[in-house]
């Protein structure tokens, strides 16, 4: 099926899409695929070995046999009801773009995406941790690094990560279309599907260009993308002072945002590779 037909199918099915889904499947799978191709061969073998034990998770309707399946596992298990409800707040850390950056409030008690990334790395590093817990740490880590690089999981304006900001997407309009869904799905789809494919082996210089800093630094960077690009492009530069006003994304604006969305996916994939090398190398 062509990408155009896939997108049309997604539009038809939009009403059934969960607003809590992050990067939908395509964005997360791409982050995972980039990471898998850029870890060391030894780490790739350890990833494969852990994923061969994915049956320990006891989630047959949400398999994690491959890195791509692992990348969407944390969203898939939301359908299992209260069993994984404790992890719901681990997917984001919405920090107001109109206030100074501060990770402490949303990460209180570790219930935010950056804190869980750091926790999962620690669990993977420790060979004394039971295999089941290390498998779960791996699938959570692959997903959460993708979440962190979706800007509306890092910054918002008291609007549930843009879920309450109604907008259009070029010529497409829908009563249920919002800023979050645009960045989760439609914009990510367009950014990733444009050639050349972002799923490749990157050079050492390309990797080192984005590997610097800590998880907290990457959090700030994604928040800045939300502050400087996501909200102003949709609602204007005065988004913090003009009060509530409608968002609008015309085709020219979307074209300018495509490289930004693509860069976030690549950053996520390469940084995930770095964390996996550190945890399993």
Image (spheres, helix red, strand yellow):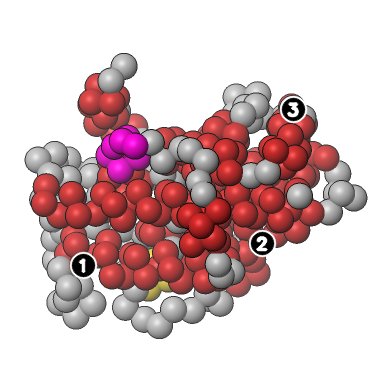
Q: Give, as a single range, the part of the protein colored magenta.
A: 190-196
Q: Residue at x 17, y 73 (%)?
A: 237
Q: Is residue 142 above or below residue 221?
A: above
Instruction: Give coordinates of residue 228: x percent, y percent.
Output: 28, 70
Badge 1 marks a residue whose secondary structure is helix
Distance between the alpha carbons at the discs numbered 3 and 1: 45 Å
Instruction: Give coordinates of residue 264: x percent, y percent.
Output: 40, 54
**Is mark 2 in CB contact (under 8 Å) with mark 3?**
no
> Which badge, 2 or 3, is on the more N-terminal residue?
3
Distance between the alpha carbons at the discs numbered 2 and 3: 23 Å
Instruction: Give coordinates of residue 73: x percent, y percent.
Output: 58, 36
> Which badge, 3 or 1, is on the more N-terminal residue?
3
Residue at the farthest right position: 128
Q: Residue at x 48, y 55 (%)?
A: 206
**Closer to us: 152 or 50:** 50
The answer to whether one can see residue 242 in this image is yes
Disc 3 residue crowd, few under 14, some 14–19, many 20+, Cα 10 Å:
some
* Quadrant housing the N terminus: top left
The answer to whether one can see residue 24 in this image is no
Q: Which mark is residue 52?
A: 3
Relative to residue 156, is residue 142 drawn left or right? right
**Is mark 2 in CB contact (under 8 Å) with mark 1?**
no
Q: Residue at label 1?
A: 232
Q: Which mark is residue 215?
A: none
Q: Residue at label 2?
A: 118
Q: Residue at x 78, y 44 (%)?
A: 133
Disc 1 residue crowd, few under 14, some 14–19, many 20+, Cα 10 Å:
some
Q: For residue 10, which quarter of the picture?
A: top left
Badge 3 marks a residue whose secondary structure is loop
């Amino acid at each position: 099926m062509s990408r155009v037909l896939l997108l049309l199918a997604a539009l038809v099915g939009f009403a059934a899409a969960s607003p809590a889904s992050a990067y939908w499947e395509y964005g997360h799978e791409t982050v995972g695929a980039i990471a898998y191709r850029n870890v060391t061969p030894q780490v790739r073998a350890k990833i494969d070995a852990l994923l061969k034990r994915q049956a320990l998770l006891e989630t047959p309707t949400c398999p994690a046999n491959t890195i791509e399946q692992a990348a969407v596992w944390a969203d898939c298990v939301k359908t299992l009801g209260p069993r994984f409800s404790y992890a719901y707040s681990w997917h984001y850390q919405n920090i107001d773009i109109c206030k100074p950056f501060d990770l402490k409030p949303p990460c209180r008690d570790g219930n935010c995406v950056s804190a869980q990334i750091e926790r999962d790395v620690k669990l993977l590093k420790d060979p004394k941790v039971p295999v089941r817990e290390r498998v779960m740490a791996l699938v959570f880590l692959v997903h959460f690094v993708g979440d962190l690089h979706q800007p509306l999981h890092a910054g918002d304006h008291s609007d549930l990560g843009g879920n309450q900001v109604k907008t259009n997407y070029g010529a497409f309009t829908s009563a249920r279309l919002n800023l979050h869904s645009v960045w989760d799905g439609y914009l990510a789809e367009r950014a990733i599907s444009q050639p050349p494919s972002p799923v490749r082996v990157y050079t050492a210089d390309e990797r080192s260009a984005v590997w610097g800093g800590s998880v907290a630094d990457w959090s700030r960077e994604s928040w800045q993308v939300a502050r400087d690009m996501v909200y102003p492009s949709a609602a204007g530069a005065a988004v913090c002072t003009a009060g509530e006003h409608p968002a609008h994304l015309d085709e020219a604006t979307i074209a300018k945002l495509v490289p930004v969305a693509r860069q976030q996916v690549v950053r996520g994939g390469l940084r995930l590779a770095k964390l996996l090398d550190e945890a399993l190398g």
